Image: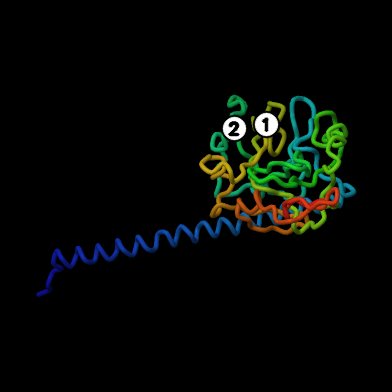
Amino acid sequence: MKKAFTLIELLVVIAIIAILAAILFPVFAQAKAAAKKTAALSNVKQLGTSYAIYMADVDDRMTPYMWQNRGGGVFITTMEVLFPYVKNRDIFLNQASSRSQGDFGINCATTANPVVMAHWIIPQWIRWDYYNWFGTTMFAGFSNQANPLTAGAGGPCDPAALSSRPWATCTEIQNAENPSSTALWIPGFFVTYNRPLPAPEGNTQFGSACTIGFAPDSFVQSAARRNVHTFTDGQNYGMGDSSAKYFPTIRMNRDSSRGFQYGGAAYPSSPFMQVR
């Protein structure tokens, strides 16, 4: 005659299973996050490679400033320009983040079906200059091109604005002092209007640009920060030499360890935003 399990034995087994589940579930979650982080790093690397090929095709000029007015109410995005080189819209996305504009604190007109179409951006509107950069006063900014779309009145490369700041620089990425330490692709959000045909943007791959931005570490409690810096308070960055690296957010935004000589004095500057 077979002996049945007692209630105590069943409870012990259930308790052991519960303990094992409590131990293993976080491990599985970490493994899943690590896989997404690796996939995101691969995406950024491919973006860097595609950008290098693009610049080789157009005499080392960078993509237009944020977006380009195609006419007819459509503003072509950086992603649209680079799509022939990547052939995959998902390359611009971080699978660990959201595609809802509301999760980034954005409110583009909902009647035009706005959606986040990229989780990495090229911040060409921020020239290298002396700023209070998210709580740290230092030389910071990114290499950006002085083309007609950026050099006009009021733009980041406006000659009048630059003349009042003799240290400021508006340059192209190939003029970065150390391309391997100069961030080109940074985590952020690019929201576009993506209405189907016959709307003007219906025959584009990524829609018409609405807005673009990023969230620094100082936005500690914001949904935008959590959706931008998704991997242990950091993200993957694409560098000027087409490599891809992971940085903790606070290191990227607040590291002023590099000195910059100006007027006979040394000033703090970011080691990740360098120009000649």
What residue did someone put label 1 on?
210
Q: Residues within 10 Å of mark 2 (few under 14, many from 20)?
A: some
Quote the CA–CA distance across marks 1 and 2: 10 Å
Residue in the foreground of this view, choosing between 113 and 244: 244
Residue in the foreground of this view, choosing between 262 and 202: 262
Q: Residue 113's spot in the image, x, y percent?
A: 60, 30
Tell us which disc is closer to us: 1 or 2: 2
| Disc 2 element | loop
The quarter holding residue 232 reads bottom right
Q: Could you tell me the amino acid type at mark 1? A: Cys
Q: In the picture, which quadrant includes the N terminus?
A: bottom left
What residue did someone put label 2 on?
106
Q: Residue 251's spot in the image, x, y percent?
A: 63, 54
Q: Residue 57's spot in the image, x, y percent?
A: 87, 50
Q: Is residue 244 left or right of residue 218?
A: right
Residue in the foreground of this view, choosing between 58 and 27: 27
- Residue sitting at 65 percent across and 48 percent down? 253
Q: Residue 178's spot in the image, x, y percent?
A: 80, 58
Q: Residues within 10 Å of mark 1 (few under 14, many from 20)?
A: many
Q: Could you tell me the amino acid type at mark 2? A: Ile
| Disc 1 element | strand
Q: Residue furthest right?
A: 59
- Residue sitting at 71 percent across and 49 percent down? 185
Compared to residue 273, the image places residue 101 above or below, namely above
Whether tag 1 and tag 2 are in contact, CB under 8 A, the answer is yes
